């Protein structure tokens, strides 16, 4: 990885702050609209340093925000997280997994621009 680690840390903190602010703004909007669940940057303990399908250990301090990789909960052209080498399968029975390079919980049928098919 190249670049100043302090700069990367500041960018990660800024992205986290923006996500929290957006979440709080949504809570303050009120109205009769149905609530919408969005993934959080934190994951259950089982995933914090878990290993992905390709053997890569998850490092909480170096994860990309979901928005940076255009994460979504649906596949694109047959590509989905459960077939990606960075995916960490469900470990606690809730149906979601995690990713060794992206923050938050990850749907097995999700997709992001960092998708890389599993190596045989």
Image (spheres, helix red, strand yellow):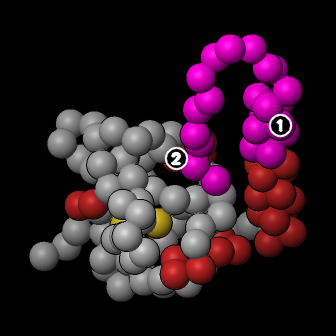
Is 25 rendered above or below residue 74? above
- Label 1 sits on residue: 24
| Residue 38 included in the magenta stretch of the image | yes
The part of the image, by quadrant, that contains residue 93 is bottom left
The part of the image, by quadrant, that contains residue 68 is top right
Q: Contact, CB < 8 Å: mark 1 with mark 2?
A: no
Question: Where in the figure is residue 54, as x and y percent of width and height?
Answer: 31, 79
The C terminus, quarter of image: bottom left
Element under disc 1? helix
Which residue sits at x=65%, y=75%? 60
Question: Where in the figure is residue 9, as x and y percent of width and height?
Answer: 81, 65
Neighbour class for label 2 at 10 Å: few (<14), some, many (≥20)?
some
Which residue sits at x=77%, y=63%? 8
Q: Nearer the viewer, residue 47 or 53?
A: 47
State the count of labels.
Answer: 2
Which dot, 1 or 2, sits closer to the camera?
1
Q: Nearer the viewer, residue 23 or 31?
A: 31
Residue 62 appears left or right of 100: right
Which of the marked residues, 1 or 2, is nearer the chain's N terminus?
1
- Label 2 sits on residue: 69
Region in magenta: 18-40
| Residue 34 included in the magenta stretch of the image | yes
Numbered tag placed on residue 6 in the rendering: none
Taking the view exactly as shown, the residue that stands out farthest to the top is 32
Taking the view exactly as shown, the residue that stands out farthest to the left is 120
Residue 4 appears left or right of 117: right
Question: Where in the figure is residue 46, as x and y percent of width and height?
Answer: 52, 81
Is 51 rendered above or below residue 14? below
Neighbour class for label 1 at 10 Å: few (<14), some, many (≥20)?
few
Which residue sits at x=23%, y=61%? 83
Which residue sits at x=85%, y=27%? 28
Element under disc 2? helix
């Amino acid at each position: 990885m190249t670049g100043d680690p302090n700069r990367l840390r500041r960018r990660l903190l800024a992205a986290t702050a923006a996500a929290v602010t957006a979440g709080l703004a949504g809570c303050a909007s009120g109205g009769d609209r149905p609530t919408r669940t969005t993934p959080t940057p934190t994951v259950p303990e089982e995933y914090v340093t878990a290993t992905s399908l390709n053997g890569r250990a998850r490092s909480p301090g170096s994860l990309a925000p979901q928005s940076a990789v255009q994460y979504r909960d649906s596949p694109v052209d047959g590509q989905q997280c459960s077939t990606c080498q960075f995916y960490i399968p469900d470990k606690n029975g809730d149906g979601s997994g995690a990713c060794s390079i992206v923050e938050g919980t990850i749907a097995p049928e999700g997709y992001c621009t960092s998708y890389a098919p599993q190596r045989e």
